[in-house]
Image (cartoon, helix red, strand yellow):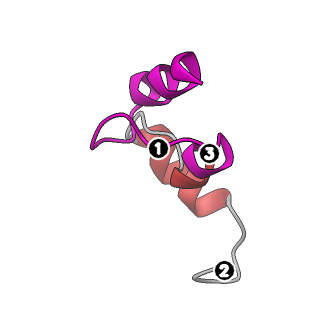
Amino acid sequence: MLNHDNGCTPCIAKNLAQREIPSCFFKKAGGEKPTKDWYFEDFAALINNI
């Protein structure tokens, strides 16, 4: 479900500026997020644990 009709661009721009991965990537990877944050390193840890 979208919160707006602007597509993914605003979310991705915000996340890249904050060195984060969009939450949909964590969900699509099919695993629970290993930490409370959404940083690149957290996503890498998730992928390494799958």
Q: Nearer the viewer, mark 1 or mark 2?
A: 1
Mark found first going from the N terminus, 1 or 3: 3
Quadrant where the N terminus is found in the figure: bottom right
Q: Earlier in the sequence, mark 3 or mark 2?
A: 2
Q: Secondary structure at mark 2?
A: loop
Residue under circle 2?
Answer: 1
Foreground residue among 7 and 49: 49
Residue 23 placement (x, y as % from top left): 51, 52
The circle drawn on residue 32 is 1
Q: Where residue 19 sits: x, y (%)?
A: 41, 33
Q: Amino acid at mark 1?
A: Glu
Q: Residue at x 60, y 54 (%)?
A: 24
The amino acid on which the numbered mark 3 sits, given as a three-letter code, is Phe
Image depth: mark 1 or mark 3 in front: 1
Report if the CB atoms under discs 1 and 2 are less than 8 Å apart: no
Q: Position of residue 4 (x, y in %)?
A: 62, 83
Instruction: Locate the C terminus by quadrant.
Output: top right
Q: Tell me the kind of residue under disc 2.
A: Met
Most foreground residue, 48 or 20: 48
C-alpha span from label 1 to label 2: 20 Å
Q: Residues within 10 Å of mark 2 (few under 14, many from 20)?
A: few
Give the quarter of the image for residue 25: top right
Q: Decide which of tag 1 and tag 2 comes sooner along the chain.
A: 2
- Which label belongs to residue 25? 3
Q: Is residue 13 left or right of residue 2?
A: left
Could you say whether the residue bearing mark 3 is in a helix, strand or loop? helix
Write the start and end of the magenta stretch as one range: 26-50
